[in-house]
Amino acid sequence: IDRGGQVTFHGPGQLMVYPLIDIRRANIGVRKLVTALEQSVVDLAADYEVGAAARADAPGVYVGDDKLASVGLRIRRGSSFHGMALNVDVDLEPFTRINPCGYAELEMTDLHRLGIALQLEDTAEKLLPYFLRHLD
């Protein structure tokens, strides 16, 4: 599957955010879509006083050097496919067997390890308004 990026892991406890958007009709660029995904996680983390940030050199959202959310998009005929995986409460061990997103020794984290005890459904409800605001 060509979703941009390299090897990753998806499993229980991840919130998959796959916005299917006609970016031409919505009049947004790919960079704006990626930024909206990333910043929605940054805003959610900030609600719990966790300092998360996007990085210019590597897509996704990080807390320190640890990756909290991975972004991988594919644009075909003006429409977005795939999206973002936010680690909410996930077994991170499978990440140790790969180079996540092509980065050797990249450490992954999740919201629970950061002290944010949200269920997947609650996380989705809190994330959506931020995502929509950043698309506006």
Image: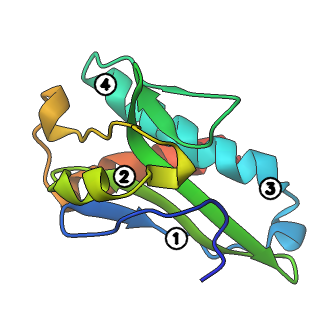
Relative side of 2 to 107, left or right: right
Relative side of 27 to 93, left or right: right
Q: Amino acid at mark 4?
A: Asp
**Separation (CA) of disc 3 from disc 4:** 26 Å
**Mark found first going from the N terminus, 4 or 1:** 1
**Separation (CA) of disc 2 from disc 4:** 16 Å
Relative side of 1 to 69, left or right: right
**Separation (CA) of disc 3 from disc 1:** 14 Å
**Mark found first going from the N terminus, 3 or 4:** 3
**Mark found first going from the N terminus, 2 or 1:** 1
Q: Amino acid at mark 2?
A: Leu
Residue 133 image offset from top left, x and y in percent: 59, 43
Q: Mark 3 — residue? A: 30
Q: Amino acid at mark 1?
A: Tyr
**Separation (CA) of disc 2 from disc 1:** 11 Å
User: Please, what secondary structure does the residue beneath circle 3 have?
Assistant: helix
Q: Mark 2 — residue? A: 86
Nearest to the eye among marks 2 and 4: give it. Answer: 2
Q: Mark 1 — residue? A: 18
